[in-house]
């Protein structure tokens, strides 16, 4: 199977299985999404969703959060991973949004990345989810699933994976494909014990077929 055929097969499957895949983070405004994505770094969406209701109730806008101190934010998000750093980043980015962007989350990717605590992946997530930007944010799930399926080849960094996926998927599907790979990695193609036996993509999966060949060789010895 060629790489192009593999991408086509993955698209065909997910368009039927997850035609309306979306973020599992809870949010109502662009600012809330940006905050939730910053909090989600090296943390589960479930934990973030348990934490953000109190945070958004206290600080619903960039203007409100800009007036807070990191210590006040920390008290609300302390169950999140790296709460000290994230509290500082949230206050700083809120102040930046107010001072530089009139209180509105910028739509431009470079402008987003200029905010404290916002890297390439976070900016791409916000752009894809809010405005349908044709980008591929790469987190640990996307990186792992892309490599196992064979959508990425010899990609040693998230950026290399991002570029290969953006070249392989149809442009208009990229915002959806991001969620496909995340959700597949979260619930089926898990890190430690992937559920290959129940995976509908096992027939085209490079990892699975390699394991099958390996097991067959061992049985024939």
Image (cartoon, rainbow, N blue to C red):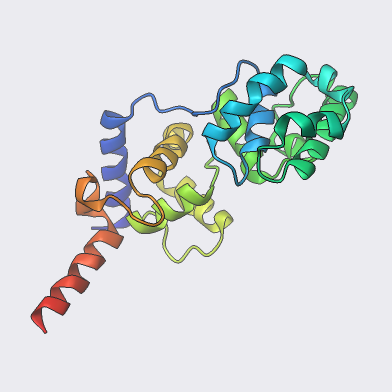
- Is residue 60 in view from this perspective? no
Quadrant of residue 81 in the image? Answer: top right
The quarter of the image holding the C terminus is bottom left
- Is residue 94 in view from this perspective? yes
Look at the picture and state if 106 lies above or below 12.
Answer: above
Q: Which residue is painted at 22% across and 43% down in the image? A: 200
Q: How many marks?
A: 0
Q: Residue furthest left?
A: 220
Look at the picture and state if 11 lies above or below 51.
Answer: below
Q: Determine whether, in the image, residue 114 is placed left or right of residue 174.
A: right
Quadrant of residue 58 in the image? Answer: top right
- Give how far across and how far down residue 121 sits, in percent: 62, 43
Look at the picture and state if 191 lies above or below 34.
Answer: below
Q: Which residue is painted at 43% across and 32% down in the image? A: 176
Foreground pick, 169 / 27: 27
Q: Determine whether, in the image, residue 133 is placed left or right of residue 216.
A: right
Q: Which residue is painted at 83% across and 28% down in the image? A: 72
- Give how far across and how far down residue 135 sits, in percent: 54, 39
Foreground pick, 205 / 63: 63
Q: Residue furthest bottom?
A: 221
- Give how far across and how far down residue 154 sits, in percent: 45, 66
Quadrant of residue 63 in the image? Answer: top right
- Give how far across and how far down residue 149 sits, in percent: 33, 54
Q: Which residue is painted at 90% across and 22% down in the image? A: 67
Foreground pick, 133 / 194: 194
The quarter of the image holding the N terminus is bottom left
Foreground pick, 83 / 4: 83
Q: Determine whether, in the image, residue 91 is placed left or right of residue 33.
A: right
């Amino acid at each position: 199977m060629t790489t192009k055929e593999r991408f086509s097969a993955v698209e065909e499957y997910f368009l039927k299985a997850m035609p309306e895949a979306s973020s599992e983070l809870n949010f109502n405004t662009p600012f809330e999404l940006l905050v939730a994505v910053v909090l989600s770094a090296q943390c589960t969406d479930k934990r973030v969703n348990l934490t953000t209701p109190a945070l958004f109730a206290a600080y619903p806008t960039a203007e409100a959060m800009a007036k807070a101190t990191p210590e006040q934010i920390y008290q609300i998000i302390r169950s999140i991973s790296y709460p000290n750093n994230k509290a500082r980043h949230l206050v700083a980015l809120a102040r930046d949004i107010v001072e530089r962007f009139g209180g509105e989350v910028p739509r431009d990717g470079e402008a987003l990345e200029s905010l404290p605590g916002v890297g390439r992946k976070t900016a791409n997530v916000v752009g894809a989810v809010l405005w349908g930007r044709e980008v591929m944010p790469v987190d640990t799930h996307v990186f792992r699933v892309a490599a196992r399926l064979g959508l990425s080849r010899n990609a040693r960094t998230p950026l290399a994976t991002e570029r290969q996926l953006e070249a392989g998927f149809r442009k208009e599907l990229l915002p959806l494909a991001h969620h496909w790979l995340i959700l597949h990695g979260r619930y089926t193609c898990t890190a430690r014990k992937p559920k290959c036996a129940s995976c509908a993509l096992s027939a085209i999966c490079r990892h699975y077929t390699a394991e099958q060949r390996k097991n067959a060789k061992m049985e024939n010895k």
